[in-house]
Each structure stands twice: as structure tokens, then as C-alpha cells.
Amino acid sequence: MTTSPRRYHITTFGCQMNKADSERMAGILEDMGFEWSEDPNDASLILYNTCTIRDNAEQKVYSYLGRQAKRKQEHPDLTLIVAGCVAQQEGEALLRRVPELDLVMGPQHANRLRDLLEQVSDGNQIVATEPIHIVEDITKPRRDSTVTAWVNVIYGCNERCTYCVVPNVRGVEQSRTPEAIREEMAELGQQGYKEITLLGQNIDAYGRDLPGVTESGRHQHTLTDLLYYVHDVPGVERIRFATSHPRYFTERLICACKELPKVCEHFHIPFQSGDNDILKAMARGYTQEKYRRIINTIRDYMPDASISADAIVGFPGETEAQFENTLKLVEDIEFDQLNTAAYSPRPGTPAALWENQLSEEVKSDRLQRLNHLVNTKAAARSQRYFGRIEEVLVEDQNPKDSSQVMGRTRGNRLTFFSGDINELKGQLVQVKITEVRAFSLTGEVLTLAPC
């Protein structure tokens, strides 16, 4: 198959931050005259936005690159780009491994894609991984949805978790100004977007790098202040935020979420381990007791709030007893959803060099045991929805059943029900829940929800 001129394809790996970056880079490409191609083999520009958190995601990138590198040997006009965290981590080493690449660019350079491509068109092979200050971006993203949207509020990460590559590949924390965030949200509201998720690697660290201190001595700009500032943006009906870090999560933030009706009752707060010694080895900066206090405080203010998190099993040196502390925390808290992973050594992280690595067999066994508990608890937690009437924002058609539409409750529970997507997309509807599963619901639409 030949390449079609001025058509592009982006494959995105990893987190919501990467998805938001891909939308922004797609917007740049379309502003340059490129058109989206569903088929990568029909595109003249292919961009892989990569993730280094797990080794399997990184290896998948190299597999995809190998196929396209062979294709480029037949079609020299093909432009090959690797962006994101693998690009930042590997830099020039990527060019040595895949010399067919035209551009290697770290996450901080996503807004510079146009300028970098101009250098490529001049015949240069470019590596853009140097640290930079992220300037306010006027690019209009190509949004994957017409109902919900991501809005970055803080880039980078200042934490130094011993297992994580993010600070090395995404740079230091850089908060956007409240005015710039509100302006982007206002434009989305005018375009008909109903739900916005504010994004940051550690979003509750927002504002620490911005100037100003209050009379009480706290930072003038915090996530709590930002929520109050953007809450009345016209057209936006729901606001979410992710991902939170227990080190910075405050009761003041919880109070704001309770008080502000547009902020959804869903909190994603990774705990990573239920054992204090492992948390210390991870350099997480909190204890499991503090984590429990955060969740208890959320439920004191909002008893029905949905709680999701991330957890790692098989961290170097983790004993069976320490793993069982993680199981106990999951048993006690009863998460609505928990993203789990076996520890994966990542290049450039301290823990990858430790000698007390666990075997893959032990990690696999613990992951299976944790997942079994997670599914059991999530299914039990989901029972509270049965027979209730939930407000659902309709996002799209059910890809597995064209007679159904799908959307999410305020608690972020995916919900399916019969309906015409042309009539309901973007609408807030009242849905009576008739069937519950561990991570999704089915119901019957009643009425449009009051706006």
C-alpha cells in the first residue's frame, strides 16, 4: 500500500496525559493540512506517543516501529516520529536503534511539533529532549470526543518515587495560570463540551511553582482555589480531576468538592502499597494510615463517593506479610476500581538497580491474588447502584451494541442503556439501574436531567 500525501496516524500508549498530548499534536497536524488516517499504512506521517511505565508498552513500540521502518525503506517520503516518554528516555539511542526515524521528541516538546517538522522537512534528523519551559499553547487540539475533554493544568513531576521514570521524562512541575486554564475551559464550553477532566501527573500539587502566598502562609494558587475559579464556566456541566497524590490531598480540597456541584464525586488517589516500609522504600512520602484518613474524610463528607486507585505488587524486597498489608487495605477500603500492576524495573530508576528483585513467578502470583480481591470487592461495591436513579452523561454509542448508548455516572461508572445516539449524545439523562457488574452498569432511561 502506498502512502497518501498529508495523512497522519497517531498511536498513543499509556496515561491520560499522553492522550491529551496526542490530541494537541493532532490539532497541530490538522492545522498544517494533514488529515487523520485510521490505517497507519495509508499515512505519510506516523507518530507513536509512547509510555515507559511498563516494559511491555515500551517493547510494543519497538515492534510497531520495526514494521514501519521496513515500510519506509520502500517509501522514503514516510515521516516517522516517536514522541512521549520513551523518546525522552532514549533520546539519540533511539536513532541508533531505528535509524529510519525522522524525529524523536520528549513530552515537553509536544507544543513544538510544527517547528520540529519544519526542521525535518529541511532534511534534518531531530532529537528534541532538552528541558524547556512550556509556553502557553494556543494550538487547538483534535479532541477524540465531542462531549468530554482533557485540560492540562500542570505539567511534569517533582516527586522522586524510586520505581518511576516520570520525573526523568516529563520534567519538573510547571503549572499553567488559572486564567489560561479558564480560557481553555470557556472555549470548550462554547463548543458544547459538557465534561472536563483537569489533568496533572500530581494534580493536587498544582500551583506550588506559581508566585504568591496567602496571609495564612499557604500557596496562593492551589487545586482547591482553581476549582472555585473555574467552577462557573458556562456550558461545562461536570468537572473531574486526576491524578491525585496522597502527599498533597487536603481536607480543604475535599470540602470544595463537596461544596461545588459541578465537581463529580469521584477521586483517583493511588496508594501503590498498603505497607509502610514498602511506601518508604518507594519514597512515596506518606503512610498507609494517612491514606486511610484521606479516604475516611472523603466518605465523611461524601459517603457515596467513588474511590479508585493504583497499586503495585512485587516491589523489590516485598515480603508475603507486606503484600498481605496491601490486601488488607483493599479489603478495608473497598475500592470502586483499582488499577494493578506487577513491579517492572525501569531504566534510570533507583529500584531497578537493587539486588532484592522478586521473581516473575512471585509477582504474577501476587498480582492474580490482588486482582481476584479487587474484582470481588468492586462487584460488591457496585451492588449499591441496583434500583437507583443515576445521572448519566451520554458520550457515545455502545461499540458492541448499536441499539445502546453509553455514558458515565458522576461516580465515573460506565453505564449502558437503549437509546438513539443522535438524540442523546451530550445529554444528561436520568437512568434507572437494572443490572450491575463489577465495573459497569445497565439501565433504563427515564428523563433528561435538569441542567
Image (cartoon, helix red, strand yellow):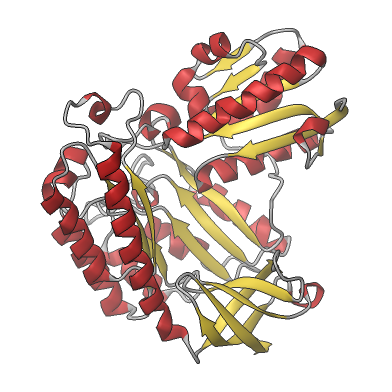
Front in this rendered view, residue 197 or 230: 197
Place of residue 434 in the rendered image (x, y in percent of width and height, measured from the top left): 56, 88
Q: Residue at x 51, y 42 (%)?
A: 14
Place of residue 308 in the rendered image (x, y in percent of width and height, measured from the top left): 38, 63
Q: Is residue 5 left or right of residue 73?
A: right
Quarter of the figure that contains the N terminus: top right
Quarter of the figure that contains the C terminus: bottom right
Q: Is residue 251 left or right of residue 169?
A: left
Task: Please say if 30 is above or below 347.
Answer: below
Image quadrant in which you'd find residue 420: bottom right
Q: Is residue 214 visible?
A: no
How many numbered badges does the structure rendering display?
0
Task: Please say if 416 is above or below 120.
Answer: below
Front in this rendered view, residue 377 or 133: 377
Front in this rendered view, residue 199 or 102: 102
Q: Is residue 106 left or right of residue 243?
A: right
Q: Is residue 345 left or right of residue 94?
A: left
Q: Is residue 376 visible?
A: yes
Place of residue 98 in the rendered image (x, y in percent of width and height, measured from the top left): 60, 14
Task: Please say if 406 is above or below 190.
Answer: below
Place of residue 399 in the rendered image (x, y in percent of width and height, measured from the top left): 71, 64
Q: Residue at x 38, y 75 (%)?
A: 305
Q: Residue at x 50, y 90 (%)?
A: 388
- Furthest toward the front, the residue is 361
